[in-house]
Image (cartoon, rainbow, N blue to C red):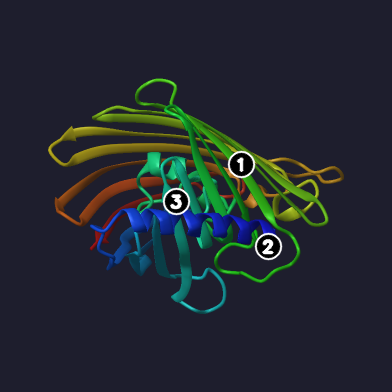
Amino acid sequence: MNNFTILLLGIILVSDVTVAQESTSFIPGGKPFAKIYTNLNYKYSGGEGRPAFQIKRAYLGYSYKFSPNFSAKINIDVADPGVGKLQMTAFVKNAYMHYEKNRFDFYFGMILTTQFKVQEKFWGKRWIAKSFQDEYKLGPSADIGFSTAYELCDFASADFWLVNGEGYKSIQSDGSLKTGLGLTLTPIQNLTARVYVDHMKDSSAQQTLATFLGYQAKRFSLASEHNYQANYNMEEGNDFYGWSFYTSIDLFKSFKFFGRYDNLTSLTPDGRDLPWNLSKDGQLFMAGIEFSPVKGVKVAPGFHGWKPADANQDFVNGFYLNFEYNF
């Protein structure tokens, strides 16, 4: 892998020097950026209600363009780590070099993975909820390694990536690398289809298959995705699958309706009586209204409902007021 990466970087550097010699009008420059996700919510389950105010994430970073083809970006993610007693922890979410020329893209470093990039863009509500694969941890949104993408023709592009496989919160090397390959098609105007597979092996091979179909019109979008993962976390027999459907409809001015339905189901491994992930299996129901009172600010009141697959767990009602600040 090292020799291949060095060769690829050498080709890119030579080609970029040539472009730089041909162009004298480009001025290098960069800019800082910030994005904040926060919400006020009230959850009701089992006869008890719990109000809460949350700062879900704060992204702080800087992007810089060295030439028409070379750029770099660093992005610090401040969020709840989900473990221990810490309330907020800072991580390096992205720190990468990007090269682009004609139909070719190359990223190297702590990169954004392409596993569910198309789905997340179609969903368009990351500040409200993660997309399916991200939410149920079928793969990390960022990891250390490299990715390439090439536009094969006007209606087809392919992407390939090789990463550590641990995600951006854990970058140690354990000898297991993750490879992913995706193909995205736009056979007709406004219609996008995608198929994606990946492989990661230790004691057992973790493998993912994801398909997506989405329609995006001027004032309306509708999408569905199906996801399957075998040997989750490289544990033999820990297989699960799920569907996600989501839509967005422009109502008037800057107001949009959005809706989503998820269904996550784990299988029962040999020798067991219950699905391995039963406590986290279930169905998600989501609906709300999104609007933007001023540029850089989004607001979305909405309902989130979770129906657990485990009959011993209660339905969870959630009423949310979500905010995104982008500057």
Indicate the secondary structure of the residue bearing disc 3.
loop
Indicate the secondary structure of the residue bearing disc 2.
helix
Residue position for label 1: 181
Amino acid on which disc 2 is placed: Asn
Q: Residue 54 placed where, x, y %?
A: 36, 66
Residue position for label 2: 2
Residue 105 in view of the camera: yes
Q: Real-space Cα distance between discs 2 and 1?
A: 20 Å
Residue projecting furthest to the top = 188
Q: Nearer the viewer, residue 47 or 186?
A: 186
- Left or right: 303, with 96 as reference point: left
Residue at 20% across, 57% down: 296
Amino acid on which disc 1 is placed: Leu
Q: Residue 289 placed where, x, y %?
A: 25, 42
Q: Nearer the viewer, residue 12 or 293?
A: 12
Earlier sequence position, callout 2 versus callout 1: 2
- Left or right: 49, with 23 as reference point: right
Q: Residues within 10 Å of mark 2 (few under 14, many from 20)?
A: few
If the image is split into quadrants, where does the N terminus sit?
bottom right
The nearer-to-camera label among 2 and 1 is 2
Residue at 23% across, 57% down: 25
Residue at 47% across, 64% down: 96
Q: Residues within 10 Å of mark 1 (few under 14, many from 20)?
A: some
Indicate the secondary structure of the residue bearing disc 1.
strand
Residue at 24% across, 29% down: 218
Q: Nearer the viewer, residue 10 or 146?
A: 10
